[in-house]
Image (cartoon, rainbow, N blue to C red):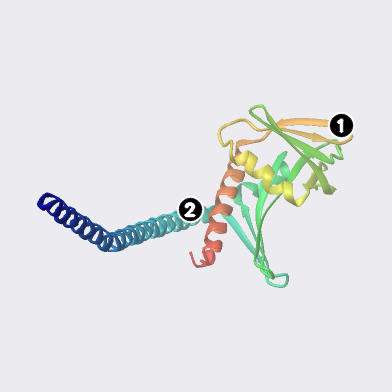
Amino acid sequence: MKNILSWSVLAIFLLFVSCRNEEEKVGTTPQQTEAELSANASALAERQRTEAEDAAKKQKESIDSARMTIKRLKPKFDHEVDVFEKVETYNHKNYRNSMNINGIKGWIYINGKDNLLTLSMHSIYVSSKRLFHTSFMVHIGGNTLEAKSVHETYDKLPSGKFYEYVYPEQGMRAKVLQFIADNPTKPVLIRLEGGDIYDFTLSQTHQQAINETVEFYNAISFLKNAGIDPQTI
């Protein structure tokens, strides 16, 4: 009987200890979870702060780089303003004699009425023989881009030579210039197509002008998107 009683007391004691342990475990779980949540929240806040600081640093570096690009390239452009039409244009100074060179002319166009910044371009053909070209192709390093005309200008120079401008559709103009600028060191082959075909290699003068026009445009565009007026630079 004593043995039975002893075993009963022991069983009750062990059950009591087990219950206390379970209570302690249950009691500490919320505290551990709360501590973990607090640590996770702190780690997340720190990560977000670091990411925000890195993003702000990169944005500042990009803005500083765009400012430096504009300061470096701005003297290479003729800036014209039409106060009546509220239009601005930036023409690279390499194009001052462009009417005497076969090539591609690109320029920056800003419509002040809607603050629209645009890259524009047209082909140039100058010869003693009319071509009446209505499209052109640009070939660089195995890749070819074709542009068809939406507007042509055919005229005659005082020298007696004929000159022709062909404007592709608006969406192709920036694409042609970017295609050339993406290959700054490669020869650019041009084919003009009309009543006949005329092939030539784009001059280094025009290639440099296009490369710097696209670079200048990208810098202006970046600052405008960042809410900074490029005219203040």
Q: Secondary structure at mark 1?
A: loop
Which labelled disc corresponds to residue 69? 2
Rate crowding at label 1 as few (under 14), some (14 to 19) or many (20 or more) other CA atoms within 10 Å.
Answer: few
Q: Where is residue 201 shown, x and y percent of the image?
A: 68, 31
Which quadrant holds residue 162?
Answer: top right
Q: Where is residue 107 shown, x and y percent of the image?
A: 66, 52
The residue positioned 60% from the left and 41% from the top of the image is: 181
Nearest to the eye among marks 1 and 2: give it: 2
Mark-to-mark CA distance, 1 and 2: 41 Å
Which quadrant holds residue 135?
Answer: top right
Amino acid residing under circle 1: Asp
Q: Where is residue 172 shown, x and y percent of the image?
A: 73, 46
Which labelled disc corresponds to residue 196? 1
The residue positioned 11% from the left and 49% from the top of the image is: 3
Question: Earlier along the polypeptide chain: callout 1 or callout 2?
Answer: 2
Which residue is outermost to the right?
A: 195
Q: In the image, 104: left or right of 56?
A: right
Q: Secondary structure at mark 2?
A: helix
Q: Where is residue 8 shown, x and y percent of the image?
A: 17, 54
Amino acid residing under circle 2: Thr
Depicted 56 relative to depicted 149: above or below: below
